[in-house]
Amino acid sequence: MPTTLRDGWELVVGLEVHVELNTNTKMWCGCATDFGGEPNTRVCPVCTGQPGALPVVNGVAVESAARLGLALNCSVVEDCRFHRKNYFYPDMPKNYQISQYDVPLCSDGFLEVEVEGEEVRVGIERLHMEEDTGKSMHMGDTGRLHGADRSLIDYNRAGIPLLEIVSHPDIRDPETAQAYLRELQGIVQTLGVSDARMEEGSIRCDANVSVRRPGEELGTRREIKNLNSIRSLGRAIAYEAEDQIATLEDGGTIVMETRHWDEEAGVTSTLRRKETVADYRYFPDPDLVEVHAAPEWVEALRQTLPELPAASRKRLADAGIPDAQATTIVGSGMIGWYDHAAASGADPRVVANWLAGEVTGQIAAAGLDPASSGLTGAHVAELVTLIDEGRLSNKLAKDVLDGVIESRGAKLPSQVASERGLEQVSDEGELRAIVDRVVADNPDVVEKIKGGADKAIGALVGQVMQATKGQANPGLANQLLRDAIDER
Amino acid sequence: MALSAEEVRHVAMLARLALSDDEVEALAPQLSDILAYADQVGEVAAEDVPATTHPYPLRNVFRADDARPSWPREDILAGAPEVEQDRFAVPRIVAEEG
């Protein structure tokens, strides 16, 4: 059930999502962007705004921005430019951030998300290009922002290409906000323009929240920051809705301000009054020339967009895959593995079952994610084929998968199976001897089966499996047992 | 357009300039004159004249996404008012910017 509000109120939410692009270099200079460099080692005259330094736009970043815009059903404007957003804050050494102002690269899109089985369309106002800021460490008694006596700044992140995606205030409940962010994250990852990991900050979300009586004008909004997970986003919006309604019902007023979400306490608190747009004194950056997105170029980008998550999920549903499995497979980026395995002839439903179940579980248990697990579509295809061919039981296949993940994909399932001696015994002669012994040892069970208690054969199959340490092909064991019983 | 003393103080605050009352009084008419001078552009700008950001007939100047060496850290930190843990140490930040 979506979160319900007090009677007679409506919640209005718009989201601002920032996506850090995974280009090799920064937005305006050739400093490397890879994660984890020593502090202030990826910094140069351009990204620190030294006099005379000349920024030049990263072409790949512009292409990534346009591709994401197209995937979000936006139009890409033909001509746009960059502006300086001026503010004094030490996270930007230049005292301004280069961003886009009057004409963003992309605008007027939408994203459709499914919430509780219903399709909700969230409008997208704009997608613009800008640059990330440096990272601050707040030192002092509390180790937190309030109460810190000094801040230490690392500019490695300053200047990394950033996209800002601003939604319309079309969201009416926390669940839709969460679904929107999750879907956007999936699209970004599918396009491969960013890792879009919330925990690493490569995708971040601020929420503009207000409440009103249905049918009335929009209420005054508060902007909520420090939302570090999809869960935080939902909790913070629910908290804000309740807090704003309570304030208004008590005769108070809401002021436009920026608030900070405290995940532990589960509350928001005032960070600062919002500055007005005019205070940023935007003006066109004189060092950067205009970007012209030729319609043919945009069309070529559109043609090469990959299948997006919603389309992948629909395709899986059409193949008879349950929704929950499809969501897991697409959401964790395993659709490529699914396609590879299905194309190699494995039963799609078995593949999906393995991917959404055991594969997902084991990867998580190993503290990995699909991308870092070393698995590929070839591993999955071979594993499922071995099961299909009766060479691995489900139980043995789990052990094999464990070995494959342990090797980070260096070994194929067949290699692990033979190294660990896990191949299923499908040799009739070998099995028949065991079957004959089991039948001879259990005359009472055999009588029951002959008397029509067909299910009792399970007990005998179990004994065969035990005698072979789980390596007997269960189907073959079953068949041989029936043959042996019939012969009696 | 004439700037009020209050507007001058606001602009000074945005630029982090501490102005005395005398300076505000002296600057208000000067800044107003500068604005009036810039306003003259509006007299010739017409619908058919596109806004220009710079005088060069250039667009789409892009950089290949190839990394180049950054500056040595000592050089970057040489300009820092104070250094701590290889970072720029600044007076505490009051509010988060985004």
Image (cartoon, rainbow, N blue to C red):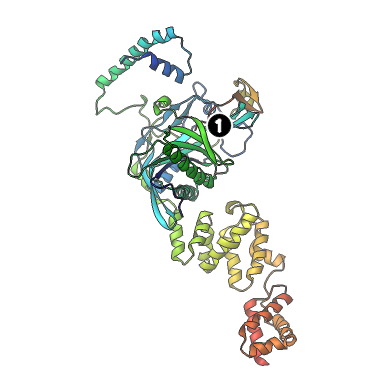
The image quarter in which residue A411 lies: bottom right
Q: Is residue A74 at least partly visible in the picture? A: no
Q: Identify which residue is drawn at 61% across, 51% down.
A: A372
Amino acid of disc 1: Gly
- How packed mark 1 is, by other alpha carbons closer than 10 Å (few <14, some 14-19, many 20 or more), is some
Taking the image as shown, residue B82 lies to the left or right of residue B42, namely: right
In the image, residue A226 lies at what x, y percent? 53, 38
In the image, residue A197 lies at what x, y percent? 55, 45
In the image, residue A464 lies at what x, y percent? 70, 79
User: Which of A261/B88 is in front?
Assistant: A261
Q: Is residue A447 at least partly visible in the picture? A: yes
User: Which of A187/A214 is in front?
Assistant: A214
Which type of secondary structure does the marked residue at label 1 adopt? loop
The image quarter in which residue B39 lies: top left
Q: Chain of mark 1?
A: A
Q: Identify which residue is drawn at 66% across, 84% down.
A: A481
User: Which of A457/A311 is in front?
Assistant: A457
Q: Using the image, determine if residue A300 lies above or below residue B2.
A: below
Q: Identify which residue is drawn at 51% across, 65% down.
A: A342
Residue located beneath label 1 in the image: A134
Which part of the image, by quadrant, shows the C terminus of chain A?
bottom right
